[in-house]
Image (tube, helix red, strand yellow):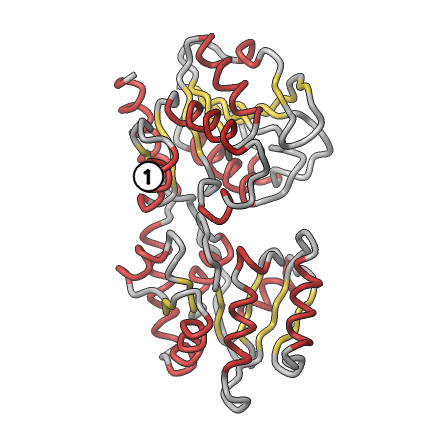
Amino acid sequence: MRFVSYYPRAISDSSGVTEALWGWAAALVDAGHDVLVLHAGGERRSPPPAHERPGLADEAIPHRGSGRTTYRPVELERWLAPGDLLVLHEGWVMSNLVAARAARRAGNPYVLTPHGVYEPGIRRMLKPPLRLRNVVERWVVEHAAAIHVVFDSEGRLIRGLAPGAPPLIVAPIGFTMGSDRWTGGGGYLAWIGRYEPTHKGLDILIDAVAGLDPGERPTVELRGPDFNGGYGRTLDQIARLGLGEWIHAEGPVAGEAKATFLARSDGFLMPSRWEGYGIALVENLAIGAPCLVSDAIHIAGPIAAADAAILAPPTVAGMADGLRRLREADSADLGARGRAFVESTFAWPALAAAFVAGVERATRRT
């Protein structure tokens, strides 16, 4: 079976979606399948060179439109051969509707990978016409052969949007364990991600630190790129609450500087209100860093089962209590459980096999 993965910004964007797309492409090639990635072209920012291997190809195809919400592939079916499976990514975009219809014209099944876009917080941010967008998205979901989700807790969101949705394929994004190890000793708790305070729960975290007695307050180091002015809002909140002594927000870090920043932290924080996966969290669990994690995100259930991190509600009181519990925890023991959790849960070969088996079940059904 050849997998044809379609995402207009597959090479022109560098994001969690593209990282997952190319990770899956490489894992499927390693499992013996051919993969073709179709996109709208643009300056290449993704994939990293490690994903360039025999059996994995990408091609720019004609598009109409000029951006995420208006892109539409032209006659995508010309790139589909009999027996190919089309994989669509994200949602709420016209490109997926046009691609899904093209696959149906060609007689090819498709699988939809939403990447967390059906979270209530994201749906609240959708622009009108909402009724039409819901009708279109429901059609794309219900005509798929299967929906590929990261964790089974996403199922309720899928059914809430499209009661007639097809079966789920539950297969998390894999992770390749590296040699980096957490050492601690830096005297700070770390957060890394996009400055999107509502989604990422930064406003909650900052209020939680403010609610602690000054003698209890940890030093918190925030790193990441701005997103729609979120960096400025974060700085304003820190200043307004007089927390400049304890919380420091700076720009993104990468490479060796990022590795050192995370390894030397006294722990990693993920206070998100919602999260489809949380690659930064998995990276920190993998190096053995003790982590404080929102219990509202999808990975929280598996983490709880493995006792792999401290979980707390994404509320001011919940995060304040979580910060206290993180300070009191046996950091080395907690970090070891987190690393074991990643090793046992996110191995690419097993996940690729589970995904392919799910696809085969779904296509037999259709």
Which of the 4 image quadrants contains residue 245?
bottom right
Q: Where is residue 310 in the image (x, y as percent from the top left)?
A: 37, 69
Depth check, front residue: 280 or 100 = 100
Tag count: 1
Q: Where is residue 291 in the image (x, y as percent from the top left)?
A: 43, 68
In the picture, measured across the screen, residue 58 lies left or right of residue 33, that is right
Q: Residue farthest to the bottom?
A: 215
In the picture, measured across the screen, residue 204 lies left or right of residue 347, that is right
In the picture, measured across the screen, residue 47 lies left or right of residue 170, that is right
| Residue under the point 35% across and 22% down | 145
From the image, tell me which residue sits under label 1: 170
Where is the N terminus found, in terms of image quarters?
top left
Q: Which amino acid does label 1 sit on?
A: Val
Where is the C terminus found, in terms of image quarters?
top left
Q: Where is residue 215 in the image (x, y as percent from the top left)?
A: 52, 91
In the picture, measured across the screen, residue 308 lies left or right of residue 324, that is left
Figure check: 130 above or below 243 = above
Depth check, front residue: 215 or 361 = 215
Q: Position of residue 309 (x, y in %)?
A: 37, 67
- Neighbor class of circle 1 (other Cα within 10 Å; few <14, some 14-19, many 20+) is some
Q: Is mark 1 on a helix, strand or loop?
A: strand
Depth check, front residue: 117 or 311 = 117
